[in-house]
Amino acid sequence: MHDHKPNAADSGWFRGRQLSPAWMLFILTGLNLFNYLDRFVLSAVLTPLQKDLGLNDGQAGRLVTAFMIGYFITSPVFGWLGDRWSRKWLIAAGIFIWSLGTLLTGFAATFAMMIAFRVLVGLGEASYATISPSLISDSYAPAKRNNALTIFYVAIPVGAALGTIMGGIIATKWGWRHAFIWAGAPGLLLALVLLPFVELERGQAEGQTAEAAKRPSVRDIVNLFRIPDYRLVVVGYTAYTFALGAFGHWGPTFLQRAHGVAVEQAATFFGAVLVVAGLLGTLIGGFAATAWQKRNRAGYAWTLGLSVLAAVPLALGAFLAASTVWSMTFLAAAMFFLFLSTGPVNTLILETAPVNLRASAMAVSIFTIHLFGDMWSPEIVGRLADSFGGNLQKAVLILPGALIVASALWLVLAFKTKCGTGGRCGFV
């Protein structure tokens, strides 16, 4: 492999046969957009799909569970492979598998087939989500890495919105099956896009290729949680994901029950806020965190802890406000602050782990945050609401509590990182 160190002069398609950092980021971000587009097509066509296949609400919800099983359970496997095998081939396989699963969903004739194809989509996305960030981390030096990852993760709200919008339009004109077919088909070709280029060496951005070349064992992966900084990042991220998972699931329903907002209006509001707050929050939080990190080595951690802490009173205001307008305003503001952490949290997951374990570090994080976070939180909130006689407004009050836990853990990390330098503890 070529010993390529990213710098400002990298402006062409590739040097030799290796993609420049800018083109690597462009391609991976575009693929990530398709990743989330394919994932969210389902929510846009759920009503006609249920009617056509005769599925009840429980079965419709199980389709999401099937995806999650394929996604987070297999992620540690792909993390282990991503630190040992060719990453471009694993990424290509992941894109092909999730695209095939999406396309085949359009031909599903039974509920069992739907379940199988959604597991397939999750399995393919697990490969891509665990391995792509490590490839970006090897393309960019630490000073530029967080900005690059921030751009990569902007694809989440944009792709989710596009999947919802395009799925709805195609389903209305040609039926729900065509929505899955047209969403999945491009990926069968896009899977090939990285294959002609020479793969980056692990650790090359920091000049640690020898260290990165060491193949990790299963024991090394398990021992990730013995790294204090990594543990604080991931456990905090789990509490954060617990809150966001339930928040995303019950948010529109909360507006309907607590404030009498129409179903269509509530869905439109959340879709619009997802795009605007997600796009602006991710970009502003990522670039601001990079600037802060240049002055303070705990800048990423401060961004995480303080942004989530700021969201706590806003979430409480949204859940307790008597006014519909104020409730919706507080909800939008809370979502903006919560998206500020998207880039920095993923950067810290990668940078608190050894260079030869970065794919595994991402995989273990994905596995943990979903298994202990949003896999259960929507059901917990629902059961609490049932115990309160259907009062969802009381049940969602546990979510700001989860955000407090996340903020506290990340602020501990910030103080620990800053004070660990031997200098004065503080914001700067």
Image (cartoon, grey):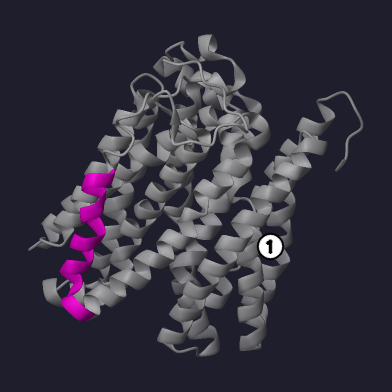
Q: Is residue 144 above or below residue 223?
A: below
Q: Check residue 189 for magenta coloring.
A: yes
What amino acid is labelled 1 in the image? Answer: Ala
Q: Check residue 109 for magenta coloring.
A: no
Residue 75, image quadrant: top left
* x then y, percent, for residue 50: 19, 73
User: Can residue 405 be seen in the rendering of this structure?
Assistant: no
User: Can residue 3 be seen in the rendering of this structure?
Assistant: yes
* x then y, percent, for residue 13: 44, 36
* Image quarter of the C terminus: top right
Left or right of 45 in this view: 23:
right
Residue found at the very far right of the displayed protein:
424
> Helix or strand or loop: what does disc 1 sit on?
helix
Which region shows up in magenta? 173-190
For mark 1, does the 10 Å Cα neighbourhood hold few (<14), some (14 to 19), or many (20 or more) residues? many
Q: Which residue is mark 1?
A: 311
Q: Is residue 241 above or below residue 247?
A: above
Q: Nearer the viewer, residue 258 or 128?
A: 128
Q: Residue at x 29, y 76 (%)?
A: 169
